């Protein structure tokens, strides 16, 4: 009896959060297969890095300038963030009930009912994966173009005899970037967590740096009234309807606000998933209210 008591005392104590996660998966019909190596911070960092304010804004900045200008790039950002916040809150609530790596298509199957579950899951899954393909390829192609410009400027510029890569070279760079990103996503989960933290830090530090540097070096500043009330209708595309122009300008903000469902897809690799996953979704969208200030400061540089 004493030996039995001693052996029971020596058994390792299981992590209560991990046990709860495994129990919840069993309730949903399958067992734990993936290693849980992400904290709530790591889960948030992955979604935040995928959203990537810098990449999203720089790719579509010309769209905001052309369609609507100051209004679409400042107030428009707040509107888009608020609307996406409503979507994020709904997703977070469902994620807390179904913390699975399937994410959206699994939720659709559960919420649609037995008869519609296969079709709802199939439709949602295909929309999700096609959106991820489009988002990944567009961002990586934009990165290839950025490399092209960096090389051009570093070798003397367009008027200084710099090297201008051909479209075939840009496509080769684009293919290399896709392969590198594919290999990075094949790394163990603790490596992905590190990359996520790095991306979150880079985006946050860079945003604050620009908010400080741009006003400091600006020689001309537009008025506050101009920044928050001026709607640019001179787009050179023959579009004059203000509502349509504003809707086009909102694409700049909306393009940046994609990918926060990543927190849901990573829940089976996240500790305390039914809380950490929803928090990752909501906080990654909530922090995007800050770049509206950056847009406002940037518009100080432009005086009509």
Image (spheres, grey):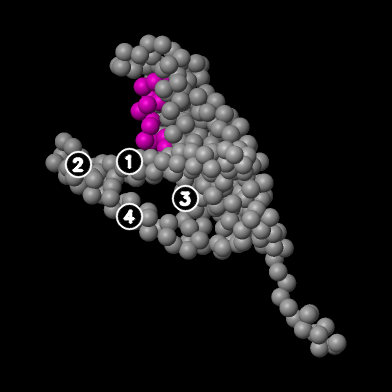
Q: What residue occupies the far top of the structure in this picture?
A: 240
Q: Residue at 48% across / 58% down in the picture?
A: 192
Query: Which label's residue is closer to the chain start, 3 or 1?
Result: 1
Q: Residue at 85% across / 88% down in the picture?
A: 2
Can residue 186 be seen here? yes
Q: CA distance from mark 3 to mark 1?
A: 17 Å
Q: From the top left corner, tell me how far across and down residue 51 is, in percent.
A: 48, 42
Query: Which label's residue is closer to the chain start, 4 or 3?
Result: 4
Q: Is residue 273 above or below residue 158?
A: below
Query: Which label's residue is closer to the chain start, 2 or 4?
Result: 2
Q: CA distance from mark 4 to mark 3?
A: 19 Å
Secondary structure, mark 4, is helix
- Which residue is under mark 4? 179
| Quadrant where the image shows the N terminus | bottom right
Q: CA distance from mark 2 to mark 3?
A: 29 Å
Q: CA distance from mark 1 to mark 4?
A: 15 Å
Please rate how many residues cluster around mark 3, counting C-alpha atoms within 10 Å: few if below 14, some from 14 to 19, many from 20. some
- Which residue is under mark 2? 167
Q: Main secondary structure of the magenta part?
A: helix
Q: Is residue 266 above or below residue 296?
A: below
Highlighted magenta segment, given as a residue range? 51-69
* Residue 142: image tag: 1
- Which residue is under mark 3? 199
């Amino acid at each position: 009896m004493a030996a039995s008591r001693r052996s029971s005392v020596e058994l390792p104590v299981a992590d209560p959060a991990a046990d709860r996660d495994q129990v919840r998966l069993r309730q949903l019909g399958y067992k734990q297969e993936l290693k849980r190596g992400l904290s709530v911070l790591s889960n948030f960092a992955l979604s935040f890095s995928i959203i990537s304010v810098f990449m999203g804004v720089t790719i579509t900045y010309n769209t905001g300038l052309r369609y609507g200008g100051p209004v679409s790039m400042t107030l428009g950002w707040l509107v888009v963030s608020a609307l996406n916040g409503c979507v994020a809150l709904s997703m977070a609530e469902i994620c807390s009930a179904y913390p699975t790596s399937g994410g959206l298509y699994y939720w659709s199957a559960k919420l649609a009912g037995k008869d519609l579950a296969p079709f709802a899951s199939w439709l949602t899954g295909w929309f999700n994966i096609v959106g991820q393909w489009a988002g990944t390829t567009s961002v990586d192609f934009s990165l290839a173009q950025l490399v092209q410009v960096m090389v051009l400027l570093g070798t003397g510029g367009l008027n200084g005899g710099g090297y201008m890569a051909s479209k075939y070279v840009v496509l080769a760079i684009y293919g290399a970037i896709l392969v590198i990103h594919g290999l990075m996503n094949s790394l163990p989960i603790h490596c992905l967590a590190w990359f996520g933290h790095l991306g979150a830090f880079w985006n946050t530090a860079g945003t604050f740096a620009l908010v400080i540097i741009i006003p400091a070096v600006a020689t001309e500043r537009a008025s506050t009234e101009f920044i928050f009330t001026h709607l640019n209708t001179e787009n050179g595309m023959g579009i004059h309807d203000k509502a349509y122009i504003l809707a086009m300008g909102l694409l700049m903000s909306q393009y940046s606000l994609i990918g926060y469902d990543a927190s849901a897809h990573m829940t089976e690799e996240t500790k305390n998933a039914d809380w950490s996953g929803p928090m990752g979704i909501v906080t990654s969208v909530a922090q995007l209210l800050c770049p509206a200030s950056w847009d406002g400061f940037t518009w100080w540089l432009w005086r009509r």
